[in-house]
Image: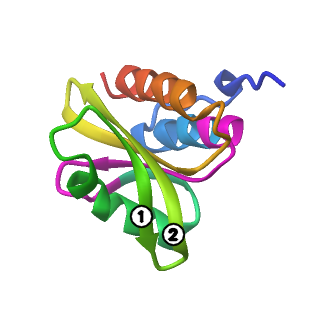
Amino acid sequence: MQIERRQKRSEDLSEALGHQLDCSAMRANFSSLVLSEELGLMVAGAGNGEELEEIAALTPLLAGQSRYWQGRVETSGGVKLVTVVKVDTALGQFYLSGVEGKLSAIWSELRQGSQGVARIVS
């Protein structure tokens, strides 16, 4: 099912990022999808609030200097599959991290989501 996220638009940066992440999370069936900055602070997210903050804080440590990272991470909610993609934007570098998700959709949705984030932030 194709979901048209452009039905929900906002001039507010935070709200626009939220719409982008909500749509990406739904398409890939992520339990959480979080955009964080280089210090591990959450910028925007979709999903479980507690899990979002935890993954945001861990992301810079997990990804390190890599553009992409995937692995199992011990969280307060148990061991979870986390996939990270670095996003370069006009405002600096961010990380887009998906938790769990439909295996066939993880990478394509994170790539597409990161392009949406870069477009919104620019």
Residue 92 at x, y percent in the picture: 17, 33
Let me know if residue 20 appears in the view: yes
Do tag 2 and tag 1 residues touch (Cβ < 8 Å)?
yes
Residue 4 magenta-highlighted: no
Q: Quadrant of the C terminus?
A: top left
Q: Decide: is 31 above or below 2.
A: below
What kind of element bears circle 1? strand
Count the labels in the image.
Answer: 2
Q: Who is closer to the viewer here, 87 or 105? A: 105
Residue 81 at x, y percent in the picture: 51, 55
Q: Decide: is 40 above or below 65.
A: below
Residue 25 at x, y percent in the picture: 62, 43
| Residue indicated by mark 1 | 73
Q: Quadrant of the N terminus?
A: top right
* Magenta-drawn segment: 24-42
Q: Decide: is 40 above or below 38.
A: below
Numbered mark located on residue 59 in the image: none
Let me know if residue 53 appears in the view: no
**Three-letter amino acid code at the position of disc 1:** Val
Identify which residue is drawn at 49% across, 73% down.
Answer: 50
Residue 37 at x, y percent in the picture: 25, 48
Residue 34 magenta-highlighted: yes
Return the residue found at the far bottom: 76
| Residue indicated by mark 2 | 79
Identify which residue is drawn at 65% across, 22% down.
Answer: 6
Identify which residue is drawn at 50% across, 29% down.
Answer: 113
